[in-house]
């Protein structure tokens, strides 16, 4: 399957703009930092059961902030890091339990 990166960027821009400008403001407080992660080699292997490990959104966020500050160069693997954070944010926001800038709960 061929994906157009520019179209993915456009979709991301529309979604994130709606998320923070219309609904949530500049930040979201996550209720949990930890998540199950399926290692890359096992993600698409349907021959055996995956052995998940534990990921940490806080560590992932710190990793991305090192890129933003210029301490670390961006790598393709950072797309995986970003996706883990976006999943955690999306899961919490979709459940209606997101805490917005003013401390209230979003719906």
Image (tube, rainbow, N blue to C red):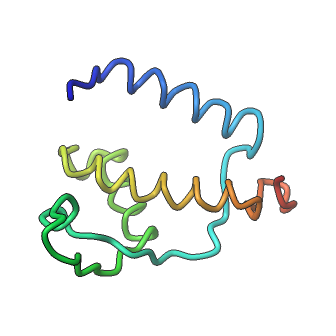
Q: State left or right for residue 43 relative to residue 31.
A: left
Quarter of image, res 103:
bottom right
- Tell me which residue sits at (57%, 76%) in the image: 32
The percent position of residue 9, horizontal first and vertical second, equals 40, 25
The percent position of residue 87, horizontal first and vertical second, equals 48, 56
- Tell me which residue sits at (66%, 52%) in the image: 27
| Number of marks present in the image shown | 0
Quarter of image, res 100:
bottom right
Front residue of this view, candidates 24 and 65: 24
- Tell me which residue sits at (45%, 70%) in the image: 58
Quarter of image, res 53:
bottom left
Q: State left or right for residue 1 relative to residue 100.
A: left
Front residue of this view, candidates 50 and 9: 50
- Tell me which residue sits at (84%, 60%) in the image: 105
Q: State left or right for residue 24 relative to residue 35.
A: right
Front residue of this view, candidates 52 and 69: 52
Residue lying farthest to the front in this orientation: 47
The percent position of residue 24, horizontal first and vertical second, equals 74, 46
The percent position of residue 56, horizontal first and vertical second, equals 40, 74
Quarter occupied by the N terminus: top left
Above or below, 28 relative to 16: below
Q: State left or right for residue 47 relative to residue 59.
A: left
């Amino acid at each position: 399957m061929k994906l157009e990166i520019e179209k993915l960027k456009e979709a991301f821009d529309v979604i994130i703009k709606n998320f923070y400008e219309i609904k949530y403001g500049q930040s979201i407080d996550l209720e949990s930092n930890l998540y199950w992660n399926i290692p890359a080699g096992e993600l698409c292997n349907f021959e055996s059961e995956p052995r998940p490990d534990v990921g940490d959104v806080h560590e992932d966020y710190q990793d991305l902030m090192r890129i933003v500050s210029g301490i670390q160069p961006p790598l393709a693997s950072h797309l995986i890091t970003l996706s883990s954070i976006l999943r955690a944010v999306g899961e919490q926001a979709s459940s209606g339990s997101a805490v917005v800038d003013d401390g209230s709960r979003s719906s």
